[in-house]
Each structure stands twice: as structure tokens, then as C-alpha cells.
Image (tube, rainbow, N blue to C red):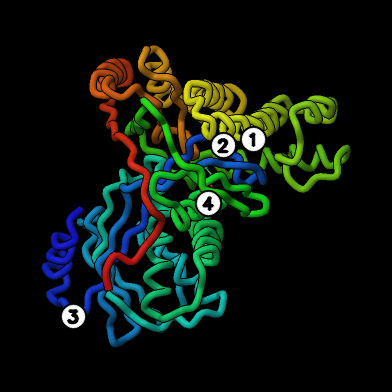
Amino acid sequence: MQTQDLINKYQQIFKSDHQLELFFSPGRVNLIGEHIDYNGGYVLPCALTLGTYAVVEKRNDSLIKLYSENFKSQGIREIRLDENIERQDTDDWTVYVKGVLKAFIDSGYEVSKGFNAYIEGNLPNGAGLSSSASLEMLVSQIIKQLNHINIDTNEMVNLSKQAENNFVGVNCGVMDQFVIGLGKKDAAILLNCNTLDYQYVPLVLNDYDLVIMNTNKKRGLADSKYNERRKECDTALSLLKQKYDVHTLCELSSKQLEEAKTLFNSDVVYKRALHVVGENERVLKAIKYLKNGHIKMFGQLMNESHQSLKQLYEVTGFELDTIVELAWKEEAVIGARMTGAGFGGCAIALVKKGSVEDVISRIGEKYHSKVGIKASFYVVEVGDGVKVLKN
Ligand code: GLA
């Protein structure tokens, strides 16, 4: 997106242009390690060059005026910093902004500066590429900058996650906000979600491109079964604590889980735990393959991850399964899986360079005739985390 275009659009909406500041916050894909962050294991996400932009002008009062090009029909929305920030039925997309403001204020930060913001994103909404965490981290960066708050990115991650958990009401883990905060161009992040220790892993895919396949089946995280899965994992953990001294499911190996099978009186809960423990082990294998350039083996683990999410964790659904299974049939595809929470949204595939266009067009056609929805495809470019573009 062109900086000047964004600035022009700000001027058209707010009819003013004093000291504009520009911000960018990316979306993300997770390469492997799904539904692992809230179970204390390893994930391997990367930040995208697609994301959310904001053009911001400080105001002299405590009013916040927001306009999103992605929700044009809602016009300019207002939030007052001199009133209590509370959730309302009419919040819609501004719930994320309010949530982050409240998280800062409740943590004792002085947030008094009002501002106007023109917001525009090129991430598809509700597609599992974390458009909401992207907006939350964008707002954190704006609040930090305008109020001269001395806060590091880890704390911004923490506050944005709090906004999602406590204000929006989705009990998400830390992965999305973390990679959106700390992502780095051309690298994935291997994050230990238990300790928050992390390392950058150069994303060298040799002869392959990473392609996002958007099923265009929308999913709402809050009303999906996300919170239900978390509860099932909590149940599994409390059963396993009868035998093992552990704080998270990912501290266990597959072997230990199997040895505790008799503790489970629900097949469903056992299956959830099987996915979590197996997926965490897959991430550790995947990282070795990636570091050693064994991309085909890495792709194989992506396939196994999808199978596990389908059969054991049951978060895929018709659209995601269809698009991933179509990808598997392509010779030029060495791995494909859903990414993010599931229940619709996006999948990713590793596709041989030079075959990408043909593969996309074949999968697109077959998906359309089977599902009746048109899919969209993007070749992934891995970018940096949230940043100030101009001030
Ligand atoms: C969503 C959540 C993340 C993570 C993924 C599943 O994106 O926001 O915290 O749990 O689902 O891996």
C-alpha cells in the first residue's frame, strides 16, 4: 500500500493534515504447531507483509476518532478517554481498540492523548490471518507513541492479548500478538509459549513458495468452538495431573500420554490431548528439518499436522479439508495444512516455484465446483513486526 495514498485518504476523511504519523502492523501465518500456544508448547509462526496501516494525528483533547476503510459504512466512530471504557453492542470492529485502551489504562499507564486515525488493512477479515491481533498491536503501538509510554514489545504483546481475553472474550493464546510484535523479515519465530523464549529461524524454502489458500469461509473466533477446545484441554490436564507433576499438556511426551490413557473416561478429551502432545513433538522435528534444508520432510509434517487437526482436534471442516486435500493431490505441492484457529479461514501450502500459477488455478477451479465458494490465493512474503513507518 502506498504511503501517500493512505495520507490522502486520511485528509479526505478528517479534512486535516497536521503532523501525521504512520504505523503498520502485520498479519501472520503459523507454519506448524496449531492449538499449542495455550498448552505451553512450541509454535512456528511468521509475520506477513500484508497487514493493517494507520495514519494518525494527535488531538488536543481526549477524544479518539476512528475510521476504517474496511468498514466504510460505519463512518467515523468515537471513543472518549474521559469516560469509562465499556463494551457495547454497537462496538463492532472498535471492540479491539477499546480493549487495548482499557488494558493499558487498567495496567496503570497514562493514556490521555486523543487522536484521529484512518485505518486500512489488506488482510482478509476473519480469515485466520490474525486481522484482529494485527489491529490490537497497531493500537498498542499508537498508544505507546502518542503518550510517550516507556514499554517494550513484550509488554505490548501482553496487553494486546489481555484485550482479546478479557474485553473481546476470546481466550486466545499468545502466539498471534507475539509474532505480530516481534516478527522479522524472512524469518519464522520458534516460540516456547511456556517461557516465551524464542529464536528466529531463517525461512529458507529452497525451490518452494509458501502459498496461502483462503477458503473464504468466514469464521468468527468468539462464537466458534475455540473456547470449548481450551476447556477440553484443561480437563485433560487436570486428569493427567493425577499421575504427572506437570503444569501444561506440552510437558508430556506421546509415550507418557499413552501410559495415562486409563485416566480418561472420554474419548474426545483423550483425542484432544493426543493432538496437542503429537503436534508439539512435530514442531521440534520440523525445526530440525527446516534448519537442515529438508523441506520435503518439513512438508510431510505439515500434512500430518492437518490430519491430526482434522481427526483428533476436529477444527478443520469441509472447506479447509477440501482445499488442503486438493493441494495434496498436486505433484508440485510437498505439504499443506490449515493455519490458525481453523473452522474455516486459511490453509497454507508449499508449492514448487514455477508451478504456483498452474497449481492455484487448478485448486481454485476444483474448490469452486465442489464447495461453491471462490477461494483466494496469495504467495506469502514474510515481513517485520509492528512498526512506526513515519513520524
Ligand atoms: C488463534 C489464536 C492463537 C492460537 C491459534 C491456534 O489464532 O488466536 O492464540 O491458539 O488460534 O493455533
Mark in the foreground, 2 or 4: 2
Q: Is residue 214 left or right of residue 158?
A: left
Task: Determine whether 368 is above or below 192 in the image.
Answer: above
Disc 3 designates what residue? Answer: 18
Per the model, the C-alpha gap separating discs 1 and 3 is 50 Å
Where, by quadrant of the figure, is residue 63 drawn?
A: bottom left
Which kind of residue does numbered mark 3 sit on?
His
Q: Is residue 36 left or right of residue 168?
A: right
- Mark 2 secondary-structure assignment: loop
Where, by quadrant of the figure, is residue 210 drawn?
A: top left
Discs 3, 2 touching: Cβ within 8 Å? no
Which kind of residue does numbered mark 1 sit on?
Asn
Which kind of residue does numbered mark 2 sit on?
Gly
Total residue callouts: 4
- Mark 3 secondary-structure assignment: loop
Per the model, the C-alpha gap separating discs 1 and 4 is 22 Å
Disc 4 designates what residue? Answer: 170
- Asked whether 96 or 18 is in front, the reply is 18
Observer able to see residue 95: no
Say which residue appears at 43% left-offset and 22% top-offset: 318
- In percent of width and height, residue 330 lies at 36, 14
Label 4 CB, ligand 1: below 8 Å? yes
Mark in the foreground, 3 or 4: 3
- Mark 1 secondary-structure assignment: helix
Where residue 280 is drawn, which disc sits there?
Answer: 1
- Asked whether 108 or 190 is in front, the reply is 190
Discs 2, 1 touching: Cβ within 8 Å? yes
